[in-house]
Amino acid sequence: MDRPVAYDKLAREERVVRMRARDVAEAKIEQGLPPFPDLRSRESIRARVHGIMVGEMQAMEGAGRSVYDFPDAPWEFTMDMARQVWDESRHLEIYLRLIEHLGGYPGEYPETTILWRCACAEDAAARVAGVNRGLEGLACDVFNQLVHIARKIGDPVLERSVDFVLADEITHVRMGSKWLTRLTEGDPERRRRAIEFQDTIDERFNLGGVRRDGDHEEVLISIATEARRLGGFTGEEIERLIKTTQRSQVY
Amino acid sequence: MTHSLEGHHSVEQSARLIRNYRYAAERMTRLLGGWLALTPEVSAKLLMGRHVWDNAQHADLFGRRLPELRAPAQVSEPSGPAFVAFMEALESPDTPELTVERLVGVYRVLKPHLLAVYEQHLGAANAVYEPPTCRILARCIEDERRHVAAGETVLGHLLAAGGLYDRAVAWQRRLEELLAAAGGVTGEGLPPVAPRSTVPEGEGSGEAREFIRLETAGSPWALPDDLRAAVQAFGDALVNGEAGALDRWIAPSARSGQAMDPALAGVRLSDHRVVAVARLGAKRIVKLRAGGPSASVTLALRWMPDPDGWRLESIEIARAHVASPA
């Protein structure tokens, strides 16, 4: 098996339409739509949930690759990644069911592979920094907000199931914080590179100002400060993330 | 009558067997994890995703038992090069169209074998001084039974697609030969494997049926009637080779650069059907698969609403297969 798997080699059913994230964003902007679905209508919630379903599938595949790609990493690392595969497979199932619940179908929106591209670091420390802290941190932001919106619109199915997924994601961020430290012990250069990789992912997923610190109903993606703290982000790291979102250009 | 303290394995033999089991469980954990990204079918993805963690726990339990048997913890050891060769072969189907081979290798060959070996070991283990090993084996047996039942359910679903049965049988036979040549996971021979029909259906197969439902369920395509008619007319023109009729659907702004792949020129197509519909704001991306006696092509068609009806904004070949001349 190849290591790593290129983004265009991700295997998908025929019902999936794959596009570059940039092309999707451009096509939406061209039509006067926000590049990232807001949460103001049931359809936009469905579009957001569909995007999350795709992200969970790639997260499961990514954690699986971490099990396969790093046979020389400590066994406990493999155990954590294998546990994450199990969690992500349940998340995929949950979001497939939520799409049904919201009246949609898998494949209703194009799949982009931007998450996967971020998950292909060849160093295990960089990968956990990028995936478990960068991408799973983003998941905490998105799910925390979705739980809030679900509560507001009176959808207990969406609220309860996403809240359980959020709890798992915090655990995954915690795993990332733990392995970033352990794998780079005594190797400050490796740690610096891993954190730099995570920073590039954080910057990319600020989505040009879409992710910000703010009220759930005011911003498209609001930073989940408390969930991030539970996942092992320091106050300084959270502040730094908020500052970078202020630097990012707004669409 | 045998003495209650008679035993079948020495401490050292027991540790060696456990290292052999750990090798199989660890490698299976890793290859299932690696295959997830290479497997298109959601039912198979969910199946393997569920079992990665169980297999890792088996490897971990075996690895933790080793120091209690005067051996280093968390060490895997194949029984010999022939078993390594078997595992290499099992891992080898890694392209998207080989999901059936992947599942056959794990769920019809390796897991049933491990189940039989664990049952044999449990039956022979001493109930007075080997309960720590027995408890691990009992847990693994329970999981493997569930996994085999679930794997069989998903395989049944995939094999129903037709044309895959012979491939599955041939691959199973090939792997069974390699496994026999290795003397199984322990190198000591193959205990008889229970026929598939005797593996009880349980929690595993119920879960697998739900994976299949999630793969096959879904609302009808979100395709407005006028777009459905346009796609049908475009597909008919494609199959009939009417270039002029095809042009009718292409937006004037998109006419340049929409030439069909030269490899498909002259290819005879006989039917077409929609296989995917995605929303992109007001636009729709429709994947249309057209097939013929010697070729199939899947086009990604981006349609946009226009005052005169739906028009094609872009055409891309998502996938093409042209059979080589015999």
Image: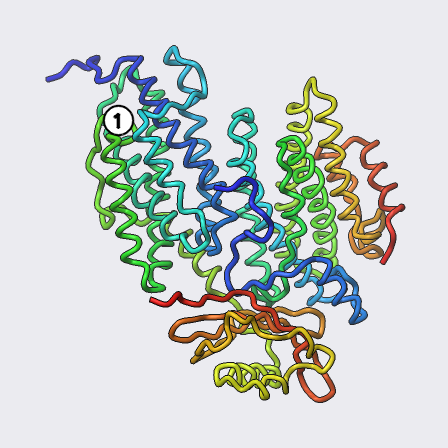
Q: Is residue B124 left or right of residue B32?
A: left
Question: Dividing the image into 4 quarters, which one contains the C terminus of chain A?
Answer: bottom right
Residue that label 1 marks: B187
Q: Disc 1 sits on a residue from what chain? A: B
Residue A188 x/y as whole percent: 74, 22
Which residue occupies 41% across, 36% down? B28
Q: Quadrant of residue B73?
A: top left
Tag 1 secondary structure: loop
Which residue occupies 85% across, 42% down? A242
**Outermost left residue:** B1
Which residue occupies 81% across, 37% down? A238
Label 1: how many Cα within 10 Å (few below 14, some 14–19, many 20+): some
Residue B78 x/y as whole percent: 35, 25
Q: Is residue A100 visible?
A: no
Residue A116 x/y as whole percent: 63, 48
Residue A112 x/y as whole percent: 65, 57
Question: Along the line of sight, which residue is nearer the eye, A11 or A205?
Answer: A11
Question: Along the line of sight, which residue is nearer the eye, A42 or B24?
Answer: B24
Which residue occupies 42% across, 33% down? B27
**Outermost top residue:** B70
Q: Is residue B203 left or right of residue A62?
A: left
Q: Is residue B227 visible?
A: yes
Q: Is residue A54 left or right of residue A26?
A: left
Image vertical order of residue B116 relative to residue B171, above or below: above
Image vertical order of residue B254 relative to residue B111, above or below: below
Q: Disc 1 residue type?
A: Gly
Q: Is residue A75 left or right of residue A176?
A: left
